Amino acid sequence: MTRMSSQIDTSDEFPDIDGDQAPRFTKALIGHHAARQTMVQACEGARFPHAWLLSGPKGVGKASFAYLLARALMSAKRPQDMGDFWQAHDSADGHLVETDAHPDMFVLKRRYNDKTEKFYADIQSDDVRELKKSFSLSASRSGWRIAIVDSIDDMNKFGVNGLLKLLEEPPEKCLFFIICHNPGRLLDTIKSRCRSLNFNALTTEELTQLITEQSASIAPNEAAAAAYLAAGSAGRALTLVEHGGMDLYRGMIDVLVGLPNPDIERLHALASRFGARAAPESFEVFCYLFSNWLYRLIHGRATGAYPQPVFEGEGELIARIGPQMALEPATRLWEKVNQEARQVVALNLDKKQAVLGWFDALSELVPT
């Protein structure tokens, strides 16, 4: 929740937009050595910047970085005393950060609307005003008051303007860690008041390490496959593992190998997995896998560098249809899949029919 005064009482009442893998639970950061070093050097400086803009692709670990920083700062009291902040150390303040209950910490993110039973489409302007009100009070424990904005991409223009006013006249001993997925869209006035910290996609090796640490029972080849398909995103890699991504990908490839005449029984069995009683996350995972597979195929057709096969039969499939795929209609289909996937989720439309329609459209692009 966003209100400092009520976080302890309400943090477990409603779903967390980050799901079970919320960044505040991160115990150790994987990768991002350049960002670590930049932060260490800033801590050793005479003046620690009051606002940081953490920019990079979604899901690579920016929020985890921010929470680990907050945890270390709340515990150490001074930036110079944080030590290896990328490792979570046990402390009373650290535990409060992890449980979303620290009285001196404010997390600005999309809230859950208990009336509609959905998350708000953006971060509400009222929450920014509540942040300003909370930061006018004295810190109760650590001396620092810390705000994590996750993410500024989710703020409307009124919220961004409210945040800008806070950055222009920051209260004493207040820090802002602002997460941004698309810095190109951000106001220059926000950028100019923040110290920038850039994050790149994680390597396949780093993602494999993360997956095996989080899921000790996963087979090595499954972990490597999930890491490859996650395309540099830690959040996506964990989502694939948590919501059966590898099984969905197998089922998808089993249908695709029959193109242009896929096995009808297999196709309907796959599409039926997204019925009314299915977990919504499974459909979203499938949408990513299908869209990403199309994208990689299109990229291979355009560049000649075809994607690495993950499961048996996929290599032969790519070699058979890739060189024959017409780029323009394939790109239109990829755009159609992405657009319809968003509409199906937002409007709660028939997921099975959407999946059947995508396979039918793809079949028409594959020569007999």
Image (tube, grey):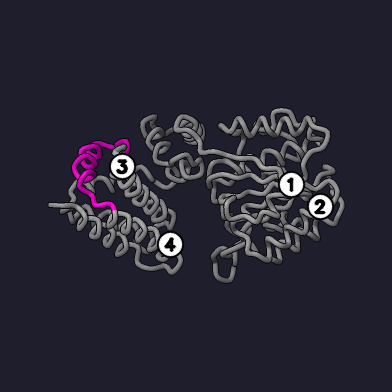
Disc 3 marks a residue whose amino acid type is: Gly
Q: CA distance from mark 2 to mark 4?
A: 38 Å
For marks 1 and 3, give the one nearer the viewer: 3
Direction from residue 206 to residue 177 in the image, left or right: right
For the point 29% across and 55% down, the residue is: 328
Q: Could you tell me if the residues under marks 4 and 3 are in contact, i.e. CB atoms within 8 Å? A: no
Disc 4 marks a residue whose amino acid type is: Arg
Q: Could you tell me if the residues under marks 2 and 1 are in contact, i.e. CB atoms within 8 Å? A: yes
Disc 1 residue crowd, few under 14, some 14–19, many 20+, Cα 10 Å = many
Q: Is residue 309 highlighted in magenta? A: yes
As drawn, the residue found furthest toward the left would be: 368
What residue does disc 4 label? Answer: 342
Disc 2 marks a residue whose amino acid type is: Pro
What residue does disc 2 label? Answer: 170
Please tell me which of labels 1 and 3 falls first in the chain: 1
| Tag shown at residue 35 | none
For the point 21% across and 55% down, the residue is: 365
Please tell me which of labels 2 and 4 falls first in the chain: 2
| Magenta residues (range) | 307-327
| Tag shown at residue 300 | 3
As drawn, the residue found furthest toward the bottom would be: 115
